[in-house]
Image (cartoon, rainbow, N blue to C red):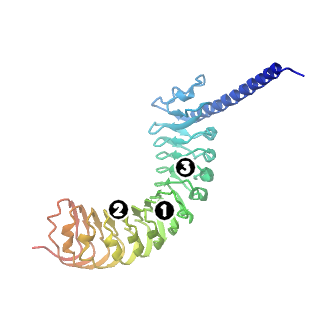
Amino acid sequence: MPSMFTLLYILLILFSVRTTILEAAQANKSEIDRQALLCFKSGISSYPLGILDSWSDDSLNFCGWKGVTCRTKFPPRVASLNFNYARLSGKLSGCLGNLTFLSRMNLAYNNLSGTIPEELGMLPNLHTLNLAGSYLQGNIPISLGASNSLSYVYLANNTLTGGIPLSLTDCSSLSTLILSRNNLSGEIPSTLFDNSSKLAVVDLQKNSFTGLIPRFHKVTALKFLCLTENFLSGNIPPSIGNVSSLTSILLGQNKLSGLIPETIGHTTKLLELDLSFNSLSGNVPVSLYNMSSLKNFSVGSNGLVGQLPSYIGHSLPTLQSLIMGSNRLEGLIPTSLTNMSNLQMLDLSDNSLNGRVPSLGSLANLSQLVLGSNLLEAHD
């Protein structure tokens, strides 16, 4: 029977072997990251600012390379890539999918081309993805919404095509989705505003989306909604009024029709409302004239009828712009407008308003006044 000393010696050897194996495995993971970075560099054809000069095959300290941030724990792993406005040209390599501890990727406003690699959807810890302002094309990868940690997606100002992947709209961790100024098309997925407790910013402006605006169901954090300059049609869903967190509703320059939902007046934190350049009809709901938080109120270039309420200058005390031109409004311009001390822009042109124009000389901040093409009388 071996002695106690022998057993301890054997255990010590086994522990030493296990430690050596673990250290080798950890070093191998770090080397995978280093090789992934070098692979990324190989796809970059030009970097005139010299930002990748320190990235060399014989340099082992990749955590010291410019643009790279590693986690503080051992072994060193890449946690962040930051090349904002770095004038990089070239294509994104799928090797980036090997950076399994990467949580933040900011390659915004460069000259990158080609497609977004599917491998980016395989990054289990990716929280922030910013690829805005380049020349990226093709579809948004279906894999992108697979990560349970993805929160911030900013792909604006590219030439992306296709639709929004369902996997992305179903991503429960997503808080910010900015896809503006691309060539995206198709319908906005019906699940985008369905049971999302974290989604706060949605910006899809200046694309070619068609179909209806999805209903809003149990969306509790949404603050900024911009769908401007698309080809959306149908009615504005009344369920939008259930989103009490909204501060911006921007739906201008679409093909929306029907009545303005009275329920929009339930969004008591709303700062800006833009429904201009659509085909909306009927009266402006009274509830909208009582939204004391509003700063910008634009419903111009529709088919709206009715009169401006006499109390409008008192019920919208913080208003900075009021744009209701190119509708079918009639009646008088309320004298209460003289109480809007913050008003900078007033456009009531191209309606059927009549009577005298109130004296607006007391509005010190008013810089743009457009009242043409009405039936108005000049003020004495």
On the question of residue 13 being in view, the answer is: yes
Q: Residue furthest left?
A: 380
Q: Residue at x 46, y 55 (%)?
A: 180
**Element class at badge 1:** loop
Pinpoint residue 133: horizontal percent, then vertical percent: 46, 46
Give the left or right position of residue 178, taking residue 306 as reference.
Answer: right
Q: Residue at x 31, y 72 (%)?
A: 289
Which is more foreground, mark 3 or mark 1? Answer: 1
Give the left or right position of residue 351, taking residue 338 as reference.
Answer: right
Q: Which residue is mark 1?
A: 220
Q: Which residue is mark 2?
A: 271
Which is more foreground, mark 3 or mark 2? Answer: 2
Q: Residue at x 26, y 80 (%)?
A: 330
- Name the amino acid, label 1: Thr
Splitting the image into 4 quarters, where does residue 273 fall? bottom left
**Element class at badge 3:** strand
Q: How many marks?
A: 3
**Element class at badge 2:** loop
* N-terminal-most mark, 3 or 1: 3
Which is more foreground, mark 2 or mark 1? Answer: 1
Q: Residue at x 48, y 41 (%)?
A: 111
Q: Which residue is mark 3?
A: 137
